[in-house]
Amino acid sequence: MKNSTTRTILQITGVILGLYALYFFRGLVGYLLVSVALSFAGRPVVNLVSKVKIKGRTPSSSVGAIVALASLVMLGGIVLGMFGPLVTAEAKVLNSLDPQQITSTVKRWLASADSFSARLNISDQNASSILTSHIQNLIGLDGVGSIFTGLFAFLGSAFIALFSILFMTFFFLKDAGLFHKMILALTPESQIEKMEHVMESSSHLLTRYFSGLIVQITIVTLMVSSGLAIIGASNAFLLGFIAGLFNLIPYLGPLASTALGLTIVATTYEGDPSGWGFHILCAGTVYGMTQLVDNFFTQPFIFSNRVMAHPLEIFIIISMAGLLGGVAGMVIAIPGYTLIRIVAREFLSGFKFVDALTGKMK
């Protein structure tokens, strides 16, 4: 009895330390998981290259990995290139703005703000002077310096992330069983069988989840693209694709994609000026109908049925992940939680709380 209790305590301690290590090295773990996902996407290309024979010899796995990696990079470049026309259209809109009209509009706003603040007696400093001070700080040396510092930091982080992901993806493509070997190498011999069950179950449930995400992105993209095309909006397919991608971010993504989409629709409208308001209303209806379908059909099907979890449970986990990791935490909340439940079911079964959370899992 004593040995059993000690073993249970050690197992719980090990799980807690493992979760802490995952959180502490979450950046590296994130790169690793993205690399594994990309290796799965590029695996068919590696298999195809391995079947090609040149002078009776098949290419090595390194050649297949290079071809697959180059294909993924090219596909990413094509997706980024799709945003070119949209950026050009928005640049034309900005170029067509009348500076004098903007100045007069801002002056009217400032005058109204000063009048409002004077009536409320908020402070001795009026709104226009406060706004002017903020603008001066923004365009001053300190403001410009902070902007460039942030930009260079972002570019540096993006380069490191891209290089790390591509580097690890190459080796995962080169050796199909590398990730499996890494996990087993970190597992004690006595727990190998349980870890095999964990990887088998996680592969099954996560495949169901990610295939469901593809269905969700496709549905949202088609609905938004078709609706915007019917009302005559520019860049309809691209806006639909953006809406589909933003839907990967639970709860906040649809709101952000709707705001961005309506802004682009409003600024790229080229029809009769009298119909501008009705055009925006129609676009808003398209986004609203899409979200109704997504909220009441697609998301429950993916988040609940495919990962065997209650919708309220999912909401709580996503909210907690958002507080801990921001947008990135919300994106990986569901697959991460699914993996934790699988591990808990294998290593901590018998506890009432664990059994309650994992009871619906197959």
Image (spheres, helix red, strand yellow):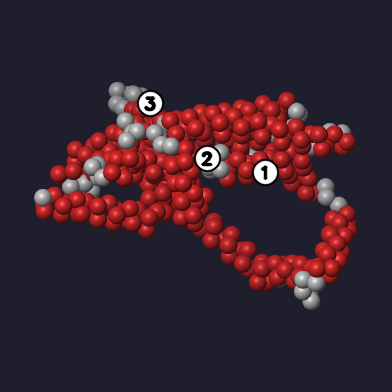
**Disc on res. 248:** 2
Label 3 sits on residue: 48
Q: Which amino acid does label 2 sit on?
A: Leu
192, above or below 98, in the image: above
> Quadrant of residue 349 in the image?
top left
293, above or below 342, in the image: above
Label 1 sits on residue: 260
**In this picture, residue 69 sits left or right of residue 61:** right
Q: Which amino acid does label 1 sit on?
A: Leu
* Residue 357 x/y as whole percent: 35, 41
Q: Which residue is pictured at 41% across the width and 49% down the height?
A: 30
Q: Which residue is pictured at 79% across the width and 76% down the height?
A: 124
* Residue 274 x/y as whole percent: 88, 36
Q: How crowded is mark 2: few (under 14 residues within 10 Å), some or many (20 or more)?
A: some
Q: Which residue is pictured at 63% across the width and 63% down the height?
A: 147
> Quadrant of residue 42 in the image?
top left
Q: What residue type is labelled 3?
A: Leu
